[in-house]
Amino acid sequence: MCLALEELIQACCAEDEGVPVVLVCGPKNTGKSTFNRYLINLLLNRLPVVEYMECDIGQTEFTPPGCVSLSSVTEPVLGPPFTHQQMPSKMVYYGQTSCEQDTERYLDVVKYVFSYYKKEVPLIINTMGWVKGEGLLLLIDIIRLLSPSHIVQMDMCDWKVMPPLTSEHIHFSAGLHTKGKQQSKCKQLGVGSMESWKCPEGEDVSAPQHKLLYVHPEFPRAGVAGEVRVHSSILRDMSILGYLGHLQSPDIGAVLPLHSLVPYQVPFNAVALRVIHTDVAPSNIMYAVNASWVGLCCIPEEVRCQSEGPVLLTQTPICDCLGFGIVRGVDMEKKLYHILTPVPPANLRLVNCLLLGNIAIPNCVLVGQQGIEGEIPYVTSDYNYSIMGSGKLRKKKQHLKRRFECDYP
């Protein structure tokens, strides 16, 4: 790892070789996030700013989960994600912690966010730990799309999970949505000399070249993804709680429960509404929105509605996300959303779209409210589970290890 870091620092500080774009990839639980933080901190000792692009929607570094973002990092990253939630320079709310259901939209979102990178300072790109099957093919698509100058591949020494992502492998292998270049006839036939073969006119024989750096994690149980699922969900909840912490006063004192905070009132016809991850009948849309985590977004089109009813989008837009909020209530008589959010009023004026994804409010926010007499809002044990779309809150249980497994030899 030290050799890879030294080479990356030298490349990022060199003034005559262009601005490096470093893509870090590998299976789950191989230390990608830790490597990124360490690299960022080392670079900040030599550079005033480092750009960071988050493509791992399940384990985001500077934002709540479900986002693809581009951030300018100017201070050392010294803790887990919930300790340094910040507003990126560009962010899109994908709305899920996995992109398996809609990989095309995921690639469109990545392309949109990357287009705002100005190529003035080094860029570090974090990727998902989904590197098996279609996940590996999607990673090939991402590498082709972003054309990094360096790829840091973190994997175990046996290379059973993913092959070495050399420039040649990326050039010739098919991705999930892109095709690889066919190998030249001389390479297919094993001819040693290139002089006897000429490529047809107009054929592009140049392949994007990148420097591949291997990092083999050596910490105990590296690469054992099954044991970090519960840990990952807890980190996602902590990131949301860290973001909601901006609702609290900066003064040291008692933490105010959400029901005691004054929400913004937003007219139905002032914002468009879209449920990202599933189809919801218009008659049930308000049941889905109430007490939900929503992305506060800005679409370029003007929101127009002839009536006072909600404005429903038929497709999920790829648009800027300016922050997040909780729909604390829906006033059907006055046609108002009641939204709690730490987004500054100046940015809220730009919000004209609410995106509801598959990211849930942490259970503790609803269950652990203090100062409530009687039933807790939005929490009940007496419920009819035969209603379509209903379900229990999933309780996160500690992962149970098999008897024959142990942490140490």
Image (cartoon, rainbow, N blue to C red):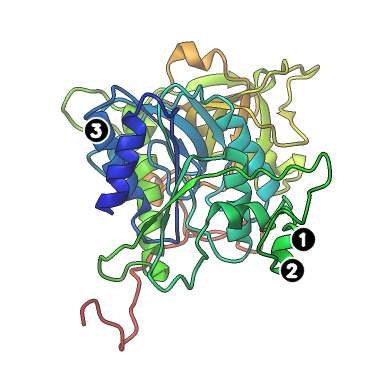
Q: Please tell me whether residue 236 is drawn above or below residue 247 in the rendered image.
A: below
Q: Tell me which numbered mark, 2 or 3, is placed earlier along the sequence.
A: 3
How far is mark 2 from mark 1, CA to CA? 6 Å
Counting other residues with Cα less than 10 Å from the Cα at mark 2, is it few (<14), some (14-19), or many (20 or more)?
few
**Which residue: 69% across, 32% down?**
317
* Quadrant (top left, top right, bottom left, bottom right) of the C terminus: bottom left
In the displayed structure image, the side of residue 239 where residue 108 appears, left or right: right
Residue type marked 1: Lys
Counting other residues with Cα less than 10 Å from the Cα at mark 1, is it few (<14), some (14-19), or many (20 or more)?
few
- Which residue corresponds to mark 3? 76
**Eye-nearest disc, 1 or 3:** 1
Residue 80 lies, in percent from the top left, at: 28, 45
- Circle 3 — which element? loop
Q: Tell me which numbered mark, 1 or 3, is placed earlier along the sequence.
A: 3
Residue 224 lies, in percent from the top left, at: 38, 70
**Eye-nearest disc, 2 or 3:** 2
Residue type marked 2: Leu
Q: Which of 141 and 363 lies nearest the eye of the viewer?
A: 141
- Circle 2 — which element? helix
Residue 185 disc label:
1
Q: Which of 267 and 207 lies nearest the eye of the viewer?
A: 207
Q: Are marks 2 and 1 in contact (CB under 8 Å)?
A: yes
**Which residue: 41% across, 63% down?**
155
Residue 189 disc label:
2
Q: Please tell me whether residue 378 is drawn above or below residue 391 in the rendered image.
A: above
Residue type marked 3: Pro
Q: Which of 52 and 206 lies nearest the eye of the viewer?
A: 206
* Quadrant (top left, top right, bottom left, bottom right) of the N terminus: bottom left
In the displayed structure image, the side of residue 3 where residue 324 appears, left or right: right
Counting other residues with Cα less than 10 Å from the Cα at mark 3, is it few (<14), some (14-19), or many (20 or more)?
some
Q: Is residue 269 visible?
A: yes
- Circle 1 — which element? helix
